[in-house]
Structures are given as C-alpha cells and as structure tokens.
Image (cartoon, helix red, strand yellow):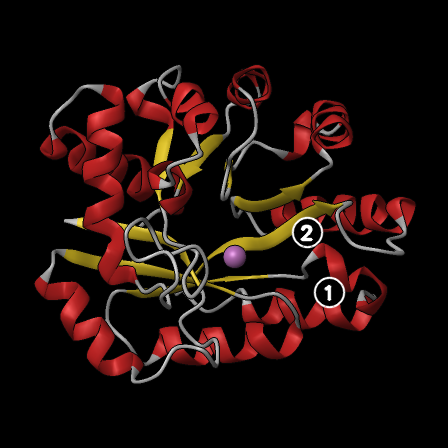
Amino acid sequence: MYIDTHCHLLDEKINDIENILIKARELNVQKFITCATDLNSSIDAVKFADSHDGVYASIGLYPEYAQQYNDQFESEIAKLAQNKKVVAIGEIGLDYSLLDCDREKQKEIFTRQLNLANDLKKPIVIHCREAYGDLITLLKSHRNLLKWGGTCHCFTASKEIASEILKLDLQISANGVSTFKNAEKVRNMLKTLPLSRILLETDSPYLAPHPFRSQINTPCFIPIIAHSLADILGVSPEEIEVATTTNARRLFNI
Ligand code: NI
C-alpha cells in the first residue's frame, strides 16, 4: 500500500475526484492527505476527509497568505483540528519567490503556526521556496516546537540542506520532480537520504512525473514516483513502498 502524503484533491484543476480515488486504490494508493492553504480550503479539506475513507486533511495557512492570519483564523483552525481526520498543520512555511513578499510577516506567521501545531500535538507540513537559510535558522531556534515531527514537502534543495532537515528530525518528501530529465541534482540529494526518512507525495494537481509532465497530476502517479525513487536509491520498489508507508503512518498516526 502506498500513501500520497501531499495532494490537493479539491483543486479545481482536478475533475472527477471520486473516480480518481477509485483508480488510485486500484493502483495500490490507499491513503491520501489533502492539503489546505487557507481557511476556506481547510474547511473544505476537513469536510471531504470526513466523508471519504482513507482521506485525511492537513490544514493551515500558506506563506503567500500570511496577511490573512489573525486570532480568529487560529481559533477556527484549532476547532477544525478536533476532527480525527485532521492529521497535520500545513502547508505552512516561507516562500521568498513571491514578488513583494513581507519576509518578517511570513516568519512571524510561520512561528505562530509552529506554536499552534505544537499545542494541537500535530506534525507540520512545510512549504519552503528560496528561503531555506531562514527556514533552518527559524526551526533550529524553535526546536522545542517540533516534537510532533513534520516533513519538508516537495523537497528539491541541496544535500547540505537535506542534512540540516534530517538533523531536526524532520522527514523529506519526494515527488515527481525526481523523474524530470534535468533533475540530476535532486536525484543526487535523494541518494543521500536514509530510507527511514523519506515520504512519497504527488502535490497533485501540480508537478506530474515524467513522461506525463504536461498533464494534470493525480495520486494515480504515486507508483511511478515510487519506482523512480527505487531506481535512484538502488533498492526494490517494494522496499520503497514499505519504508515510505511506514514513515507516513508513524508521522501522521494513520
Ligand atoms: Ni502543495
């Protein structure tokens, strides 16, 4: 059994989600964590997870929307997190690739959500783009808030940064980028990771793996990502399946 630990099942680019879930299960992808980016998508994710076996929700505020964070948002998320299908807080983090981004505001809101996740005893799902220096510094200084664990989703940074993430006892999520022809650096980084620290994700509907790169991504592509990872690490696809599923079940308690 595979688990897609990061997808956006309710994204408007994905049509006919019920059939996609049936097809994914036929391909041995049995559990799905659908990730939210703001309050409305958090509410929708919890509703969807609550009405679908094997679907779980990760809720929180994406760095791009940091200005939307306030006490009311926080208490709404805390209320939603009482639902047993909510397994993480995310995606949260830092994104400096955005034009006009307020870095200080992003750091403040990320820190508030680290506190929230810790209060709620939930792992975190981190989104980070062009901000790993600040991310590592911030996480190191809030190590006490990381005891429920977490993962760096869509991780495509260097092996040096990967090693810093591992030192913080966080997981690293591999997705379809590792299958891209020009992603030699990503493959070299993945080779340095122990099997006990890798999760699988699609980040559907984005980043479909090669040779489907131009298509809408869905959880049905998880086995392709797993087979590619097996080739990269020089292990069998079964070992990837067992290791990543064990890691995901332990981290998200599913
Ligand atoms: Ni995402």
Queried on whether the Cβ of the residue with tag 2 lies below 8 angstroms from ligand 1, the answer reads: no
Queried on whether the Cβ of the residue with tag 1 lies below 8 angstroms from ligand 1, the answer reads: no
Do callouts 2 and 1 mark residues in contact (Cβ within 8 Å)?
A: yes
**Residue displayed at 71% across by 68% down:** 75
Q: Residues within 10 Å of mark 1 (few under 14, many from 20)?
A: some
Could you say whether the residue bearing mark 1 is in a helix, strand or loop?
helix
State the image coordinates of residue 34 (x, y, percent, origin top left): 42, 64
Give whichever of 19, 180 is nearer the camera.
180
State the image coordinates of residue 187 (x, y, percent, origin top left): 38, 26
Asked if 137 appears above or below 114 in the picture, the reply is: above
Residue identified by numbered label 1: 74
CA–CA distance in space, label 2 to label 1: 8 Å
Give whichever of 183, 106 is nearer the camera.
183
State the image coordinates of residue 21 (x, y, percent, origin top left): 22, 72
**Residue displayed at 60% across by 21% down:** 161
Q: Callout 2, which amino acid?
A: Leu
**Residue displayed at 39% across by 65% down:** 85
State the image coordinates of residue 20 (x, y, percent, origin top left): 23, 74
Side of 57 where 99 appears, left or right? right
**Residue displayed at 31% across by 24% down:** 196
Give whichever of 68, 64 is nearer the camera.
64
Could you tell which of marks 2 and 1 lies nearer the N-terminus?
Answer: 1
Side of 243 where 133 appears, left or right? right
Side of 211 where 251 appears, left or right? right
Asked if 194 appears above or below 93 in the picture, the reply is: above
Residue identified by numbered label 2: 116
Quadrant in the rendering for residue 186: top left
